[in-house]
Every structure is written in structure tokens, then in C-alpha cells.
Image (cartoon, rainbow, N blue to C red):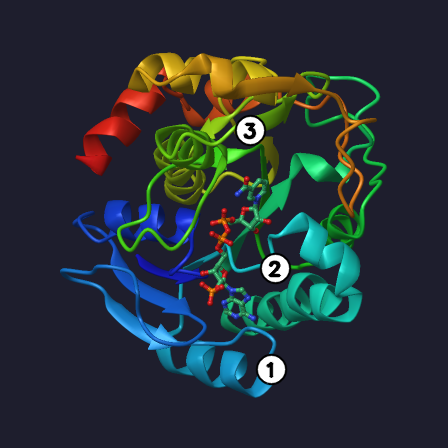
């Protein structure tokens, strides 16, 4: 099976490549913007900017992928709010290019989306919940989902929530690493306790994507961790795990802690469909922290 991964330098991209690089039945074509930062033993790396339609078409014609896992996106929610055109180009227009190329090469498109397509009025959410984004990032990811749903070849939309993990080049931060690094440096951090999420270990998400590819599962899947937690809980649990000073963590809320883009208050996912149809089994949050800790030493 020829699997093309976009955004291979990113957090999920790196974890997917780590997994697929050693799958005997997979020929991996890892792609990302710019130079290779992902480690590969067997697969090949090609530079690919998905906003360049010509580049996308030429590469697909050359490699004829059976499956495309599209992780590349502009993922910084506040940057998406302030740089709206760039956000739309990367998160919507480019998805149109990738989707069209999948149709031409008859590839199965597995597209990554987000809990930020929801407004946060209720959670946890299953695949039937109605999206209603409250940020430009969320709107762009929902518009991309609509493009994917138009495909006449098999498609899968995998939505996920607050991903954490360690990249091999430490180029990506996330809530767990931010808390750990800040507390180790003796910094006080303010963390909200009125938002709810089901944080996701990057390795689990990569496995979920691979299960969908292997089982040729189509439609929408919610893939995340299984524990509902606030960012404040996550910070406390991270501090406990790494033996750091919890008194540096100050509790705040979304009204006091203003950010350029609005965040949905309550999301988190019900993952029963992925458990039932894909055999998806995420680690507990504590197991995830132990995996992160082992990778950092
Ligand atoms: N992380 C989360 O908490 C989270 C939550 C919900 C959904 N998601 C979704 O999950 C997917 C993967 O997220 P992630 O955490 O792995 O993000 P990430 O670490 O930011 O990785 C995204 C990767 O995409 C690359 N990229 C961006 N624009 C590109 C372009 N035009 N052409 C080619 N590559 C491009 C980036 O390149 P550079 O390295 O050069 O910047 C980066 O390597 C995304 O679709 C995201 O929307 C993530």
C-alpha cells in the first residue's frame, strides 16, 4: 500500500511516519513544506507545499498513492484569526487541491479535522453533533470538511482534540511540554479551568489514522483520548507526573484570559464509533505522560 503523508514534519506527521515507516505492507512517501525534519529509515521524503496546485498534481501523478493522510494545516488558532487569508489558503484551498488530486489518482483521502468545528456549548460530542465554529480556524477546518465530503473517491474525516507528544526535533510545543518547560524554568503559568477537552496522545492519533487506512473505513470519526479534563487539570496532572511545583499553576477562566481567537468551552469526544468500528484503544492520560517522559530522557 502506497501511503502519502502531508505535513510530515509536524507533530502528527512525525508520529505517523514513525509508525508507517516500519509497517511491512506500506511504502511511505512523507511530504512536508521545506526541508525534511522527520526521521525515516525506509520511506522517502519529498518537499511539498500543498498550497501549490502544480506541485500537488505532479507529485500525485508520480507516486500514485493508494492512501493520502492529509495532516498539513495552519494549526495555530490565534495566527489563523489574525492571518485569515493565509489560513484559508492552507486549510481550505489547499484541501481542494489535495482532494482533486486524490480523485484523479483514485486515492483514499484521510483528512484531519478538529473539535474547533464545534461551538463548545455541549460536550463530549459524537460524530452526529452539529458543527458551529466560533473561530476562523474552526470555520476553515469545517469548510475543508465540506470539500472532502464532495469527493467521489473514498474519504475519511478524522476529528481530534488537543494533541500532545514529543517531536524528534522538538520543533513543536503543546500543552504538556509547555507546562513542563515553564514549571522547570520556575515560571508562573495561568491556565483556564472552564474549558473541557479529551487530550490526545499523538501516537494514539497516528494509530487511529492507520487503522482507518487499513480497514478502508470511510465517513467521520472522532479520535481522541477518553478522559474529559480542563487545561487546569492537565497542568496539575503534568506537574504531578514530572514532580514539579504545582503552586506555580494559577487557575483562571476564559473571561479573564483573553486570546485573539475564541475557544469553544466544552468539547471533548465520544470515541465509541472509533472503538467499535476501528478497534481504536487510546492510552490513559497518565500512560501518555509516561510515554512523553520516556521520549524526553
Ligand atoms: N495539534 C492539535 O492539538 C490538533 C487538534 C485538533 C486538530 N488538529 C489537526 O491535526 C492535524 C495535524 O496537526 P499537528 O498537531 O500535527 O500540526 P503541526 O504540528 O502544526 O503540523 C502541521 C504540519 O503541516 C505543515 N504545513 C503547514 N502548511 C503547509 C503547506 N502549505 N504545505 C505543506 N505542509 C504544510 C507544517 O509545516 P512547518 O513545520 O513548516 O510549519 C507542519 O509540519 C492538522 O490538520 C490540525 O488541524 C490538531
Is the C-beta of the residue carrying label 2 under 8 Å from the nearest atom of ligand 1?
yes
**Residue 251 or 82: which is nearer the viewer?**
251
Q: What is the C-alpha distance between the residues marked 3 and 2? A: 25 Å
Disc 3 or 1, which lies upstream in sequence? 1
Tell me, for residue 74, which label it has, or none: 2
- For the question of whether residue 232 can be seen, the reply is yes
Question: In this image, 168 relative to 150: left or right?
Answer: left
Mark 2 or mark 1: which is in front?
Answer: 2
Would you place residue 240 above or below residue 292 in this image? above
- For the question of whether residue 270 can be seen, the reply is no
> Which residue is labeled 1 in the image?
53
Q: Position of residue 111 (x, y in %)?
A: 57, 51
- Callout 3 touching callout 1 (CB < 8 Å): no
Q: What is the C-alpha distance between the residues marked 3 and 1? A: 42 Å
Question: In this image, 129 relative to 283: left or right?
Answer: right
For the C terminus, the quadrant is top left
Q: Position of residue 127 (x, y in %)?
A: 69, 27
> Which residue is labeled 3 in the image?
189
Would you place residue 235 above or below residue 180 in this image? above
Residue at x 41% of width, y 76% of height: 34
Disc 2 or 1, which lies upstream in sequence? 1
For the N terminus, the quadrant is bottom left
Count neighbours of disc 1 (C-alpha within 10 A) and say few if under 14, some if 14 to 19, many if 20 or more: some
Disc 3 or 2, which lies upstream in sequence? 2
**Residue 66 or 97: which is nearer the viewer?**
97
Amino acid at each position: 500500500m502506497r501511503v502519502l503523508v502531508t505535513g510530515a514534519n509536524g507533530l502528527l506527521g512525525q508520529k505517523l511516519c514513525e509508525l508507517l515507516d516500519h509497517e511491512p505492507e506500506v511504502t511511505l512517501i512523507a511530504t512536508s513544506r521545506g526541508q525534511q525534519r522527520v526521521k525515516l529509515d525506509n520511506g522517502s521524503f519529498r518537499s511539498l507545499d500543498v498550497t501549490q496546485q502544480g506541485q500537488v498534481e505532479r507529485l500525485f501523478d508520480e507516486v500514485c498513492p493508494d492512501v493520502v493522510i492529509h495532516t498539513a494545516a495552519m494549526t495555530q488558532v490565534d495566527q489563523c484569526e489574525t492571518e485569515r487569508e493565509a489560513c484559508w489558503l492552507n486549510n481550505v484551498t489547499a484541501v481542494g487541491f489535495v482532494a482533486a488530486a486524490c480523485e484523479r489518482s483514485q486515492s483514499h483521502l484521510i483528512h484531519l479535522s478538529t473539535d474547533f468545528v464545534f461551538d463548545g456549548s455541549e460536550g463530549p460530542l459524537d460524530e452526529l453533533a452539529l458543527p458551529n465554529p466560533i473561530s476562523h480556524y474552526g470555520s476553515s477546518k469545517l469548510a475543508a470538511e465540506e470539500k472532502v465530503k464532495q469527493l467521489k473517491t473514498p474519504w475519511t474525516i478524522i476529528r481530534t482534540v488537543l494533541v500532545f507528544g514529543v517531536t524528534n526535533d522538538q520543533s513543536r510545543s503543546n500543552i504538556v511540554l509547555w507546562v513542563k518547560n515553564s514549571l522547570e524554568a520556575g515560571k508562573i503559568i495561568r491556565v483556564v479551568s472552564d474549558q473541557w477537552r479529551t487530550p490526545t496522545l499523538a501516537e494514539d492519533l497516528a494509530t487511529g489514522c492507520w487503522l482507518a487506512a487499513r480497514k478502508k473505513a470511510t465517513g467521520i470519526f472522532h479520535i481522541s483520548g477518553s478522559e474529559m479534563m480542563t487545561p487546569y487539570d492537565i497542568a496539575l496532572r503534568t506537574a504531578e507526573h514530572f514532580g514539579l511545583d504545582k503552586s506555580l499553576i494559577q487557575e483562571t477562566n476564559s473571561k479573564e484570559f483573553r486570546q485573539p481567537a475564541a475557544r469553544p468551552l466544552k468539547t471533548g469526544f465520544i470515541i465509541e464509533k472509533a472503538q467499535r468500528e476501528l478497534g481504536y484503544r487510546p492510552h490513559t492520560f497518565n500512560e501518555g505522560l509516561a510515554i512523553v517522559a520516556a521520549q524526553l530522557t
